[in-house]
């Protein structure tokens, strides 16, 4: 929002020091704001997207990681993500970009508490598997209808910690959806 993307992306390669100077100024401003916010309001909050409770830490979106190389992620994103996590006690991350090429590097984020990969189809099933042992996952708006066959939940590894987003229209649908989730839990322990 501060730097036109048509100029910003080339600057990542041509003027890394200018990019780093801006990042430091933004980070200092965000730290000052968040420090004061948490001092006044306490450490607990509801995340920005999707809505979930965080007892501490910060939540943020990393949608731009889909447009940069893995090397740029390591240079510009990972160090700052880890600074925020270390300072505030963990991170919740949302990413709606097609950023499969960054997943190995997302595993290097310290204190990742919840991950929201907001893509459709097989990428979500792959994310459940890839991040099963790392952090809780909530691929918001990605769960199928609550009365869909149970097979879609079988793509979720038994060791994954997930939030299922199941919208229902009636008490009866809620009971049937609850039964399906209970059956899945029984089968996968």
Image (tube, rainbow, N blue to C red):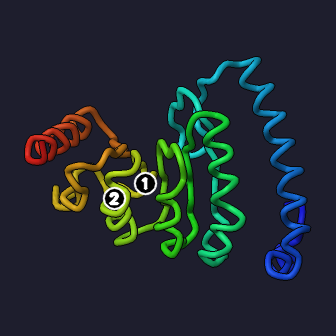
State whether residue 149 is above or below residue 39.
below
Residue 166 appears in the rendering: no
Q: Position of residue 104 (x, y in %)?
A: 46, 67
Give the label on residue 139, or none.
1
Q: Is residue 157 above or below residue 111?
A: below
Tell me: residue 120, above or below residue 52: below
Q: Is residue 98 left or right of residue 129?
A: right
Relative to 92, 133 lies left or right: left
Q: Quick one: quadrant of the C terminus?
A: top left
Direction from residue 112 to residue 184 in the image, left or right:
left
Q: Are marks 1 and 2 in contact (CB under 8 Å)?
A: yes
Residues 36 and 49: in front is 36
> Cα distance, mark 1 to mark 2?
9 Å
Residue 146: image x %, image y %? Answer: 27, 49
The foreground one among 145 and 120 is: 120
* Location of residue 142 (image quadrant): bottom left
Image quarter of the N terminus = bottom right
Residue at 63%, 75% (x, y): give it: 71
What label sits on residue 128 in the rendered view? Answer: 2
């Amino acid at each position: 929002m501060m730097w036109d993307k048509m100029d910003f992306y080339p600057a990542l390669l041509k003027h890394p020091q200018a990019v780093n100077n801006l990042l430091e100024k933004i980070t200092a401003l965000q730290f000052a704001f968040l420090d004061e916010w948490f001092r006044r309001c306490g450490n607990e909050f509801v995340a920005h997207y999707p809505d979930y409770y965080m007892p501490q830490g910060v939540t943020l979106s990393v949608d731009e990681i889909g447009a940069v190389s893995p090397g740029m992620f390591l240079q510009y994103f990972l160090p700052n993500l880890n600074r925020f996590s270390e300072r505030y006690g963990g991170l919740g991350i949302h990413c709606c970009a097609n950023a499969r090429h960054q997943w190995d590097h997302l595993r290097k984020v310290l204190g990742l508490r919840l991950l929201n990969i907001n893509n459709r189809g097989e990428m979500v099933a792959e994310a459940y598997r890839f991040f099963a042992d790392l952090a809780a996952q909530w691929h918001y708006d990605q769960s199928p209808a609550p009365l869909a066959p149970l097979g879609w939940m079988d793509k979720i590894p038994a060791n994954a910690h997930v939030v299922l987003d199941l919208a229902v229209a009636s008490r009866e649908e809620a009971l049937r959806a609850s039964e399906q989730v209970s059956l899945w839990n029984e089968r996968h322990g």
